[in-house]
């Protein structure tokens, strides 16, 4: 129930108004009979609305009292008066009343004026709260939020803009917005209209601070209008840190690609729940395939494992997934697109959730074909060398056996032969 204060120096009229208000369901919280009394009661009772007579005795008439109440309490006032001359009306208009009722009046006229006044005040309150929330959000935002009119002049400049561009709101307000862009970009953004291609899009550009330094920024522009003209609001974000991170990642990726290509290494990331597997394009290229030629799924990747090695590969993977071995590591063969067979070393580690359930495995595949070929060549050469030495030892031993038989009792000769045989046996054991 709305609370209303009645102010009129005529007691009979005040009582009549009170009767009307009670019939309408309003709560009359008090009656004052002078301007000073109205101000005092308004401060004490804080009514939702005041019905105020204009001409009253004392130092403060109704207009003076309404001015004080509006300034200090912001309580809406409806004037009720028998005076309609221009001077009185002009003074009343000066304090922006929520209504003006001329005596005598009907109850229905009073009802309409009160309902309209209360509704208007509620709308003003809601609008004020909305504006406060808006300004609170805008001024606490880290991003620069700048509004301009159709001429490009700045009409709103938040604290984020102050922090990013280093200009205060007083320095920026009313200026053409081009000063926040480097000279070489100003012509591009000079004319902004609703038909501009950048409206509603997220774009990257370059900003200019007060100290002359440039920085990368991300911008989004929206358009809005009133009856008079078009306006634009731009949200700008300093993305210096992000750009530095992106550049660092790009450089890291470049180094990684160079390293993996040089070392014939590719990575893979296996989702154990879906069997989807991310396969490094470099790993596919190592087998002679384009990225799109091998699907990122375990079944498709398995087609390129040498058939006789599939069981070994999966057995090692399952053993690691089940926690039986600390790391997944297995050497196996892969089928190249050109039909050749390559040897690979696959290593990986499983990732488990907080309950210990495995859900992902990440690892690498290294082409060790060349290494294996060198190892095989070395093995063959060692075998050849071993055979050659054994043949040589045998060729030397045969004459020594003949000498032993013919030496008779020549002890010196026999000792020499035995020493030679011992040396040959040592050589044979070493190889």
Image: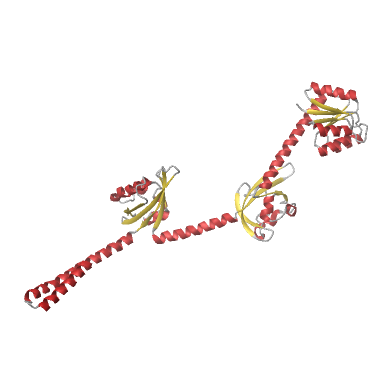
Q: From what the image shows, is residue 223 above or below residue 398? A: above
Residue drawn where x is 15% and y is 70% of the image:
394
Residue at (39, 57) in percent of width and height: 265
Tell me, what colour scheme is on the image? secondary structure
For this view, does 125 lie left or right of residue 415? right
Looking at the rendering, in which quadrant would you find the N terminus?
Answer: top right
Foreground: 362 or 327?
Answer: 327
Q: In the figure, residue 73 lies in which quadrant?
A: top right
398 or 244, nearer to the observer: 398
- How many numbered marks does the figure carry? 0
Q: What residue is shown at x 32% (from left), y 56% (from top)?
A: 343
Front residue (pair 68, 294): 68
Residue 108 in view in this figure: yes
Is 347 situated above or below 399? above
Residue 244, percent from left and from top: 56, 57
Q: Is residue 345 above or below residue 390?
A: above
139 or 404: nearer the viewer = 404
- Viewport quadrant of the C terminus: bottom left
Q: Position of residue 430 (x, y in %)?
A: 23, 67
Q: Specify whether 187 is left or right of 322.
A: right
Percent from the top left, x then y, of residue 239? 60, 54
Q: Position of residue 345 (x, y in %)?
A: 35, 55
Is 318 positioned to the left or the right of 99 in the image? left
Q: Is residue 277 visible?
A: no
């Amino acid at each position: 129930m709305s609370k209303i204060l009645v102010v009129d120096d005529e007691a009979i009229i005040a009582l009549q108004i009170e009767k009307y208000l009670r019939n309408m369901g309003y709560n009359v919280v008090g009656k004052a009979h002078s301007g000073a009394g109205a101000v005092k009661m308004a401060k004490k009772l804080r009514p939702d609305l005041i019905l105020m007579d204009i001409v009253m005795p004392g130092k403060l008439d109704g207009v003076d009292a309404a001015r004080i109440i509006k300034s200090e309490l912001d309580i809406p006032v409806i004037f009720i008066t028998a005076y309609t001359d221009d001077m009185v009306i002009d003074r009343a208009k000066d304090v922006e009343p929520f209504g003006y009722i001329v005596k005598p009046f009907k109850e229905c006229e009073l009802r309409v004026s009160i309902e309209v006044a209360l509704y208007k005040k509620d709308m003003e309150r809601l609008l004020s709260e909305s504006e406060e929330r808006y300004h609170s959000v805008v001024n606490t935002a880290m991003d620069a939020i700048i509004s301009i009119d159709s001429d490009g002049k700045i009409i709103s400049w938040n604290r984020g803009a102050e922090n990013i561009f280093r200009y205060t709101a007083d320095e920026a307000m009313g200026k053409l917005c081009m000063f926040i862009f480097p000279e070489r970009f100003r012509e591009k953004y000079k004319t902004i209209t609703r038909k501009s291609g950048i409206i509603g899009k997220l774009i990257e550009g370059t900003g200019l601070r007060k100290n002359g330094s440039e920085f990368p920024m991300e911008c989004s522009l929206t358009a809005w209008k009133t009856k008079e003209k078009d306006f634009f609001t731009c949200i700008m974000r300093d993305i210096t840190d992000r750009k530095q991170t992106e550049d660092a990642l790009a450089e890291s990726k470049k180094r990684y690609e160079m390293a993996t290509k040089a070392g014939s290494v590719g990575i893979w990331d296996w989702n154990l729940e879906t069997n989807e597997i991310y396969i490094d394009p470099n790993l596919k290229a190592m087998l002679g395939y384009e990225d799109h030629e091998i699907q990122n799924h375990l079944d498709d990747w398995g087609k390129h494992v040498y058939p006789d090695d599939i069981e070994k590969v999966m057995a090692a993977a399952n053993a690691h997934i089940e926690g039986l071995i600390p790391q997944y590591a297995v050497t196996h063969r892969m089928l190249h697109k050109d039909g050749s067979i390559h040897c690979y070393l696959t290593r990986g580690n499983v990732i488990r959730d907080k309950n210990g359930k495995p859900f992902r495995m990440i690892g690498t595949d290294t082409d060790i074909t060349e290494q294996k070929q060198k190892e095989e060549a070395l093995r063959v050469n060692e075998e050849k060398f071993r055979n050659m030495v054994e043949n040589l030892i045998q060729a030397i031993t045969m004459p020594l056996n003949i000498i032993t038989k013919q030496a008779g009792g020549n002890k010196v000769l026999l000792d020499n032969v035995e020493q030679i045989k011992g040396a040959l046996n040592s050589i044979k054991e070493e190889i």
